[in-house]
Image (cartoon, rainbow, N blue to C red):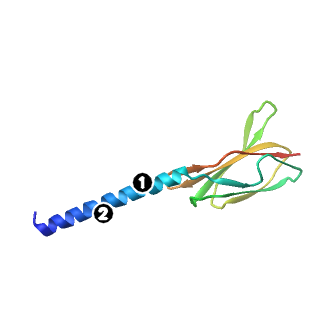
Amino acid sequence: MRPLKLIKYYFFLITFLCLSCNKAVITQQRRNDKIDLSAPADHLITPNRNQVFSWTDPTHASSYQFQLLLVGNNNTLQLIVDTIITSRTINLLMNQGSYEWWVKGLNAGIVTSSDTNLLTIH
């Protein structure tokens, strides 16, 4: 190879490797981030049937999977809501009962989860 072609080859190779490593570091950082459930507060007991669920997301996912489950008498779980949305809030009119809810952030194959919050409507 001529020296100029060799320099171009190595320049391309080094640039490619640097960009690949940078993406791996960013991806790893995003996997360690966690969605923070803002409202309603964990273990909230309220008579208010109209609830606004909201969260913050350090990864700024492109969409979110929101799940709400009704907790039965024997701690059985019944899936009530399972939806994909693009906003960080969802409003629901709920019946009396105890519920668990959580959110997953979805972004280009990376899934970011939250903790599970409990809510009781009486």
The quadrant the C terminus occupies is top right
Pointer 2 local density, CA inside 10 Å: few below 14, some 14–19, many at least 20:
few
Residue drawn at (79%, 30%) of the image: 74
The answer to whether 107 is drawn above or below residue 79 in the figure is below
Residue drawn at (20%, 63%) of the image: 9
The quadrant the N terminus occupies is bottom left
Judge left or right: residue 110 versus residue 17.
right
Q: Which mark is residue 58?
A: none
- Residue closest to the far left: 2
Q: Describe the element under mark 2 as helix, strand or loop.
A: helix
Q: Amino acid at mark 2?
A: Thr
The location of residue 109, given as percent across then percent down, is: 50, 52
The CA span between labels 1 and 2 is 14 Å
The location of residue 115, given as percent across then percent down, is: 66, 46
Judge left or right: residue 86 versus residue 71.
left
- Can you identify the residue that label 2 sits on? 15
Q: Amino acid at mark 1?
A: Ala
Q: Disc 1 or 2, which lies upstream in sequence?
A: 2
Residue drawn at (12%, 67%) of the image: 3
- Can you identify the residue that label 1 sits on? 24
- Is 107 in front, or is 1? 1
